Image (cartoon, rainbow, N blue to C red):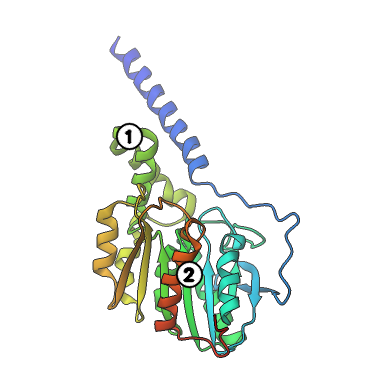
Amino acid sequence: MLRKTLIVVVVLAILGAASLWVVGSYEMATFRRPWSGVTPAPGIEPVQFRASDGVELKGWWWPGKDPSRAVVLLHGLGSNRLQMFQRAQWLHQRGFATLIFDFRGCGDSGGKSSLGYEERLDVGAALRFVQGTKGVSQIALIGQGLGSAAAVMAVDQWSSVRGAVLERLFDTLENAMRARVRDCVGPLETAVTPFFLWQIRPRFGFAPEEFAPVSRISKAKCPVLLGYGGRDQTIAPASIRALFAAGPYPTTLWALQKAGHEDLYRFDPKAYQDKIGEFLALTLGPPAGERKE
């Protein structure tokens, strides 16, 4: 009887682990967005460059009136460069040059997504492209979600960065994953999350504790703005406080009070342009030939 019970327990454990692996495959997968019918706006140059590990990245370079200042825009998880296109339009109207590109495993770029960890190499490649190939000496970063996390993990390569807008940045991958699991299973989170965390290394090749923007953000040598929705239920207040406390001086914490865990620009373009425009004016400076309102 005991033997049969043990066999049943083992079988159930195997089935449970297999089920969690399958669920993990879905939850941690990213999907390329289709490009049908999408054409660049006039003046945009299709570009490509390679990350240090050889992954080919593709994007759009939009020259501005000021050749010395540019903004690199970094999209979120499972998206592509189009997520940041409205921001690029606004910045181009102000006179800035902009680069929007697809992270690895997204859009037209090669490689495989890694939830933002290996994407730090893509951020480094983008900065080298703008600074080296395009000769830009002063750069600002604007990222959201995965893009923000990848930017912070690449902080050692921010030598030309004068300011960084980091939207919906999480403090650690573990906390971000716990929040996502909690949204799905509620109080069972503490029992379920370890199984997902265990999957990170075999799936992506790094340990969860290695992906911790909160341990890297203090290395920034420029002002940082952390942007969140005031009603964001996904990123815990404790995580936001930890990032703010670890941030360099000066770090600004900004919240759109009625927004949730969503694109802050699309939620309120006017408020976004006012706040981020002010931040860029103070850090990157107004571009030469900026259009007067």
- Amino acid at pointer 1: Gly
Numbered disc 1: secondary structure:
helix
In this image, 37 relative to 25: left or right? right
Q: Residue at x 57, y 71 (%)?
A: 90
Q: Give the quadrant of residue 16.
A: top left
Q: Which residue is mark 2?
A: 273
Q: Residue at x 37, y 17 (%)?
A: 8
- Depth check, mark 2 against mark 1: the one in front is 2
Q: Residue at x 62, y 68 (%)?
A: 57
Q: Whole-percent x and y of residue 185? A: 36, 33
- Amino acid at pointer 2: Gln
* Pick the front one: 226 or 154: 226
Q: Is residue 153 visible?
A: no
Which of the marked residues, 2 or 1, is nearer the chain's N terminus?
Answer: 1
- Residue 42 lies, with reference to residue 205, above or below; the image says below
How many angstroms separate mark 2 from mark 1 (CA)? 36 Å
Q: Which residue is mark 1?
A: 186
